[in-house]
Image (spheres, helix red, strand yellow):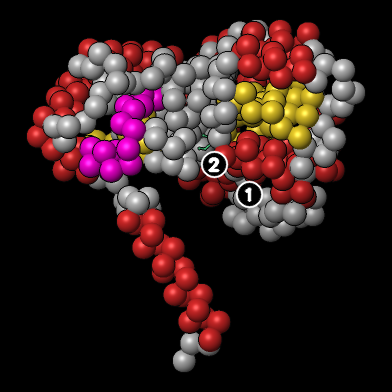
Amino acid sequence: MPSNFQEVLRRELEAGLRELEARNRLRALSEIRGVNLCSNDYLELSRHPALKDAVLRAVRKTQRVGGTGSRLLSGHATVWEKLEEEFAQFAGTEAALYFGSGYTANLSLLTALLKKEDLVFSDALNHASLIDGIRLSGARKIIYAHLDLNGLEAGLRNHALERCRKLIVTESVFSMEGDVAPVTEIFALAERYGAGVIVDEAHATGVHGPTGRGIAVKDGIVQHLAAAVHTCGKALASAGAFVCGSAILKEHLINHARPFIFSTAMPPYMAEQIGAALRISQTMDGEREKLLGLAKRLAAGLRSHGWDTGRSTTQIVPVMLGEDEQAVSAAKFLQSKGYAVRAVRPPTVPQGSARLRFSVTCGIADDEIVDLENCMNLWRKEACPTVAVARA
Ligand SMILES: Cc1ncc(COP(=O)(O)O)c(C=O)c1O
């Protein structure tokens, strides 16, 4: 017999979920099927035979396959230290510290650096992990419109006389827009107003910059950042993330980042996997070029048919549809045609900007790109003739 509490809770949760369903916002888990356009495995490294072999070798030779404790207790291993040195070199920084996920890396970094009296300037479309890190830090926040440097400067100017720590936080490649932050200009503003800059390179790691080292390396400003965050679960086909910056920042995080201190370490073979993925990915210039070429072709093709792909210039190509039900309808239609596509709805994206998010991977065939465009047009004609398309 369920207790009173359990029964009331069940009814309330059920009502909440049915209300989400009525608004086309209910999410459910399903395995993807068909041509994969919703994966962050941009270089298709997750299926690379050399990476699989490296994992098998690592598991065979390791003494333990468990994390066994936090890095400050029993979970540390020399392979992590070596990998962090290697990753810092790749990222162009003095040091790097590994976290079990990009979410906790961002949460850790922001909560360990910001106090209540500090000020953080955050792009309006930053990822939830950055937003949550800022919230949890309790720091005062100024949200500037997406990529709006005038808005950012106005905010910095308004607070120019305040003597507190100021940090500008931005993604480099935006995860839902596929556009790129002007990190050089952002850094110039930061310098003028005495602020630091944190760049989340999650969707640039392995894909953008020389040998996939990120936008901040490409633009030559990485050594001036407060920190860059690189994730390993996307193009590097592994898991976790590195906060890359100075050696003193690393020491500070080891001592103050609560998710680092109070989480069990990842098992040592994961360090071998990430190291192997990092080395293989650096040899994949051909795949990077192919990937960005395919994405460019897809965005241009969609735009030529009147679809609004926003300001995307990367492997992430959104198609803005506005209302949730249109995004859901388009996703279902494409799924029925053999494409693994998901509708992206609020709160992941702002209200009224529901969309499809095509994340291109380097193994997609040219004719699949053409067919995808045709399917989008077919959906507009057959399934949703009333859909408004913003830009021609
Ligand atoms: C911009 C950005 N930062 C951080 C993360 C979190 O990384 P992880 O999936 O490793 O937790 C994501 C994940 O989607 C992301 O898109």
Q: Name the residue under label 1.
A: 266
Q: Is residue 188 left or right of residue 359?
A: right
Asked if residue 307 can be seen in this view, the reply is: yes
Task: Report the span colored magenta.
Answer: 315-331
The residue drawn where x is 46% and y is 68% is: 13
Disc 1 residue crowd, few under 14, some 14–19, many 20+, Cα 10 Å: many
Mark 1 falls on what kind of element? Answer: loop
| Residue situated in front as seen by the camera: 153 or 305 | 153
Across and down, in percent, residue 40 comes to 42, 33
Q: In this view, does 260 lie to the left or right of 342?
A: right
Identified at 44% across, 63% down, the residue is 16
Q: Mark 2 points at which residue?
A: 239
Mark 2 to mark 1: distance in Å? Answer: 9 Å
Residue 287 appears in view: no
Q: Do the residues labelled 2 and 1 touch (CB within 8 Å)?
A: yes
Q: Position of residue 190 (x, y in %)?
A: 74, 14
The residue at label 2 has a CB less than 8 Å from ligand 1: yes
Image coordinates for residue 111, horizontal then vertical, percent: 76, 41
The quadrant holding residue 165 is top right
Most foreground residue, 35 or 153:
153
Please state, as top left, top right, bottom left or bottom right, where the C terminus lies in the image.
top left
Q: Is mark 2 on a helix, strand or loop?
A: loop
